[in-house]
Amino acid sequence: MEAIKIRLKKDDKVKVLTGKDKGKIGKVLKVVKKTNRVVVENINVVKVHQRPTQANPQGGIVEKTMPIHISNLMIMCNSCVKPTRIGMKLLEDGKRVRICKKCSQQIDS
């Protein structure tokens, strides 16, 4: 599998572009670089049948948040409050920051 440059980070607000949760906005909980997927809060929730174990003696049907591919997500800009693409900018001190392609404001705080 070819590696894609993932510019999403934990705690980013993202909007879902396709799938059953299209149009929903959530916060990134975890980034899985190996499979180019991201776990987003309350997005792509599935019901998993779980067997009783020592950790969970009850067992039963449990709701679990599953990862979603990064191509189905778009980051939300804090200043213009719209889904946007991400650009990179080099500051004077040599630090690289992410910028909004629509309003050219810095996404990283």
Image (tube, rainbow, N blue to C red):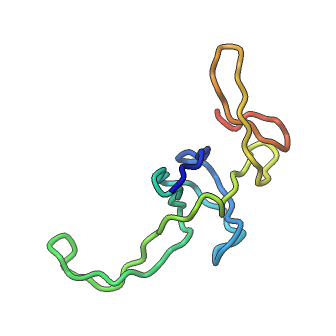
Query: On the rendered structure, is 55 left or right of 79?
Result: left
Which quarter of the picture shows residue 25?
bottom right
Q: Outermost residue, left direction?
A: 54
Identified at 68% across, 35% down, the residue is 98
Is residue 50 or residue 70 the one in the foreground?
A: 70
User: Residue at coordinates 75% horizontally, 48% vertically from top-left?
Assistant: 85
Q: Is residue 92 above or below residue 30?
A: above
Residue 31: image location, x then y, percent: 49, 51
Question: Residue 51 sits in which quadrant?
Answer: bottom left
In the rendered image, the quadrant that contains the C terminus is: top right
On screen, residue 42 versus residue 108, left or right, reads left
How many numbered discs, if any? 0
Q: Judge whether 105 appears above or below 65 on screen.
A: above
Residue at the far front in the pictured view: 1
Who's the residue at 56% across and 45% down the image?
Answer: 9
Tell which residue pokes out farthest to the top in this image. Answer: 93
Q: Position of residue 8 (x, y in %)?
A: 60, 47
19 versus 60 height, above or below: above
Give the image location of residue 75, x and y in percent.
Answer: 69, 51
Say which residue appears at 30% left-offset and 85% top-offset: 60
